[in-house]
Image (cartoon, grey):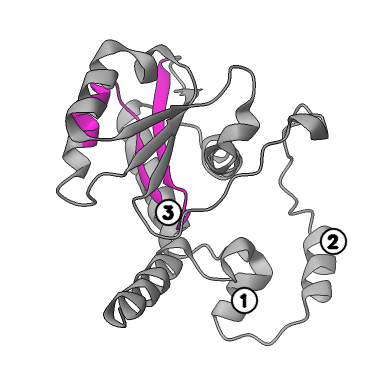
Amino acid sequence: MIYLKLRQSGWVVNHKRVERLYGLAGLQVRRRKRKKVPLRDRQPLVRPIAANQVWSMDFVFDRTAEGRVIKCLTIVDDATHESIAIVAERYPLTRLLDQLTSTRGLPQVIRTDNGKEFCGQAMLMWAQLRGIQLRHIEPGKPNQNAYIESFNGRFRDECLNEHWFTGLALAWVLIESWRREYNEERPKKSLGGLTPSAYARQLAAKLATLNSGL
C-alpha cells in the first residue's frame, strides 16, 4: 500500500526498494492468525458489476479504556469495496439502513452471517417491504462473506488496534476519520491501484457509457 501511495503522490520508486526499506524500519503490521479453510470448502465470490448491487455487513467489537464495549456495524459495497458506513453505537439496524437511503440508496442484496440482528423478524420484514434479498452465509463459513471479512481485518489492524479510545465520543471521531481515509486516500492493489472512491467513479462512468450506447 505504501508503494501505491508513493506512486499516487508522483514518486517514481521501485517496489522492491520500498519493501526492503519497509522491512528495515520495522513497519510491518502484526497480522492476526486466521484459521485456514480447506480448499474444498472455499466458495469464490463473484464481484458485482455495479455499486449498490450487493452490500456485505458484519459486526466488529472493541473496548474503550474504561471497559465499555464498542459494537461497530461495518457495511461494504462488494463492487467498489467502499466502506459505506461504520457505526460505532447501538442503534436499530433497520433505522440505520433507512438513513443511508438519502445519501447512498439501498442495495439489491445484503450478505450477512447468521447473527440474531441480521436474521431477526424486524430485519426480515424490513427487507421484504423494500424488495431487498437477504443472503445469509452458512454457519461457520466466513469465507462466503470474504469482502467484509477482509475489510474487518484491515479495520482492526489499522484503526482499532492502533488507537486507545478513552471514550465512545473519541472512538466515533477516529473511526469515521479512518473510514474516510480508507475510501478516499488508501489505494488498493485489487482495484488497479485506485482508491475505493476513485474506482467507484470509474465504474460509474463505464456503466454510463455502456448504457448510453444501448
Q: Residue at x 57, y 45 (%)?
A: 158
Q: In this figure, which residue is indicated by the disc labeled 1?
A: 6
- Cα–Cα span, label 1 and label 3: 21 Å
Q: Is residue 149 above or below residue 179?
A: above
Residue at the spot of label 2: 24
Closer to the eye: label 3 or 2: 3
Which quarter of the picture shows residue 208?
A: bottom left
- Residue 70 point in image, percent of width and height: 41, 23
Q: Residue furthest front?
A: 214
Mark 3 or mark 2: whose residue is earlier in sequence: 2
Q: Is residue 144 above or below residue 209?
A: above
Q: Residue at x 35, y 70 (%)?
A: 204
**To which quarter of the image does residue 133 belong?**
top left
Q: Which residue is mark 3?
A: 82
Q: Position of residue 22 (x, y in %)?
A: 77, 63
Question: Residue flagged by tag 1: what amino acid is it?
Answer: Leu
The residue stretch that appears in magenta: 68-97
> Which of pointers 1 and 3 lies earlier in the amino acid sequence?
1
Residue 58 in sight: no
